[in-house]
Amino acid sequence: MKLLVINGVNLNLTGRREQGIYGTETLSDIESELAAFAKEHGHTAEFFQSNVEGELCTAIQNAEGLFDGIVLNAGAYSHYSYAIRDAIAAVKVPVVEVHMSNVHAREEFRKKSVLTEVCKGEVLGFGKISYFLAMESFWL
């Protein structure tokens, strides 16, 4: 199985930004661990990060026919990007939404994701482990 892990806005600052919420490991560190995890289970993972909403939409659209699934942490775009929502709905690639923090225990605006209803599932609140659980959901 070939998975695409997409990280959105501000996730490039992981490890430096709000360490009490997101931890001290960098996004690159987490991606390396995810790649090893996928390989250990006989799968592959590729990674994409952008702060640009349209680039995230393009990555989702281009995944069709190339990937068996997408693990998506869209960051703050999760809460208001109908463009990303429509990109997910437009492709036949299943998407699992990821949040490292428990968004339901944070600010009110974070409690609603416009992406969830078009995703296969959602994993949140387990820090970087949320990514591993989302990946694993594709092969269990």
Image (spheres, rainbow, N blue to C red):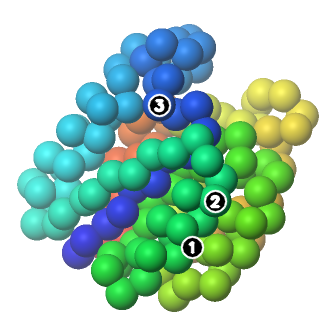
Give the number of the mark in front: 1 or 3: 3
Residue at point 54% right, 68% down?
58
Asked if the residue at tag 2 contacts the one at tag 1, i.e. Cβ–Cβ closer than 8 Å, the answer is no
Q: Which residue type does callout 3 highlight? A: Asn
Residue 123 can be seen, yes or no: no
Marks 3 and 2 in Cβ contact (< 8 Å):
no
Nearer to us of marks 1 and 2 is: 2
- Above or below, comparing residue 60 to residue 80 in the picture: below
Name the image quarter holding the C terminus: bottom left
C-alpha distance separating marks 1 and 2: 22 Å
Location of mark 3 (residue):
12
Q: Residues within 10 Å of mark 1 (few under 14, many from 20)?
A: some
Q: Amino acid at mark 2?
A: Gly
**CB under 8 Å between discs 1 and 3:** no
Q: Quadrant of residue 88?
A: bottom right
Q: Give percent across and percent down for residue 80.
A: 82, 52
What residue is pinned by disc 1?
Answer: 120
| Residue 15, percent from left and from top | 43, 18
The residue pinned by badge 2 equals: 54
How packed mark 2 is, by other alpha carbons closer than 10 Å (few <14, some 14-19, many 20 or more), is: few
Q: Nearer the viewer, residue 13 or 124?
A: 13
Q: Nearer the viewer, residue 136 or 113?
A: 113
Q: Quadrant of residue 38?
A: bottom left
User: Tag 1: residue type?
Assistant: Lys
Secondary structure under tag 1 reads: loop
**Mark 1 or mark 3: which comes first in sequence?**
3
How far apart are the alpha carbons under marks 3 and 2?
17 Å
Task: Give the mark nearer the N terminus: 1 vs 2.
Answer: 2
